[in-house]
Structure formats: structure tokens, C-alpha cells
Image (tube, helix red, strand yellow):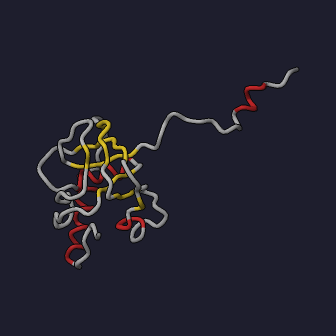
Amino acid sequence: MGKNKSANKLNESIQSPFAQTFFHGTKADLKIGNLIEVGFNSNFGQRKNAKYIYLTATLDAAIWGAELALGEGRERIYLVEPTGLIEDDPNLTDKKFPGNPTKSYRSVHPFKVVGEITIWQGHSPEQIKAMKDGLAKLKEQGIEAIED
């Protein structure tokens, strides 16, 4: 009986045409091709002029971004491509989730909008309330959601 040669190829390194997918949750109404850039008011905290923009490699973290974003617009999740270097988001990875399990990152370089996720399941109203209550408690203690 002959050996299946194709089985051996499974252990070889194979180039994939797929790159890491990144998401950006917001209430901003963006179009494919738009750039998300620093210099605008943040969707969070005191709405200061943003020094960084944020993205994540997990849909759940992007959903939280959309649900917690300030403003009156519809919650949106965009697929984005970074145009430059990204780094771990120290607001989450250093303080709340060591090791970056949320796969949250930030950059000073723009993100290009390449698509929009239009069907997704948000968190329950109870989960959102608990998260917002927790953020409000931190704010009372002088701890902002985003520290540059």
C-alpha cells in the first residue's frame, strides 16, 4: 500500500492569501476607502483630541467599542487595514488584560476602511449597563477610559 504524499504536505509551511483581520467599533458613519485618523475628538472619555486610534483583532472587542462609543449615531463595526505600525493598547493590555487577550492595538497611523460588518450580535442590556457603571465608577476615581 502506497504512502499518501499529499498528507506530508500538510506539515509544510503554506503561504496564505489572508491577512490578519482588524475591526474598529464606533458610531461614526464611514464609507469604504475612508481613513480613520488621529486628530479628531475621541469617542470615549472626555472626548479629547485623539492622539491614537484603536483597532482590535476580535469582533467582541469591536462590539464593545461600538456600544460604548459616545454620540447618537448607529453602532457600527468596520473592517480596517492599518497603514503603519500598530502597538498593544496599554489602556487594556497593561492595566486590565495582561498578555493582550482582547487583541487590542493602537496607532498614530491611519486605518483604511475596507468593509463593514452589518450583522453582529451585541451584548445584553445588562452587560452594557454593568460595563458603563464600571466605567463611571472609574471616572469618579479619576481614572479615564483612555490615557495617552
- Please give the name of the residue rendered at 35% of the width and 46% of the height, measured from the top-left corner: 23
Q: Position of residue 53 (x, y in %)?
A: 29, 56
Report which quarter residue 78 is drawn in.
Answer: top left
Q: Is residue 136 above or below residue 58?
A: below
Q: Is residue 6 above or below residue 49?
A: above
Report which quarter residue 43 is drawn in.
Answer: bottom left
Name the side, left or right, on which 148 lies relative to 7: left
Q: Is residue 146 above or below residue 84?
A: below
- Please give the name of the residue rendered at 39% of the width and 46% of the height, measured from the top-left corner: 22
Q: Which quarter shows the N terminus?
A: top right
Residue 134 visible in the snapshot: no
Q: Position of residue 35 (x, y in %)?
A: 26, 45
The residue lying furthest to the top in this view is 1
The residue lying furthest to the bottom in this view is 141
The front one of 83 and 114 is: 83
Residue 102 visible in the snapshot: yes
The residue lying furthest to the right in this view is 1
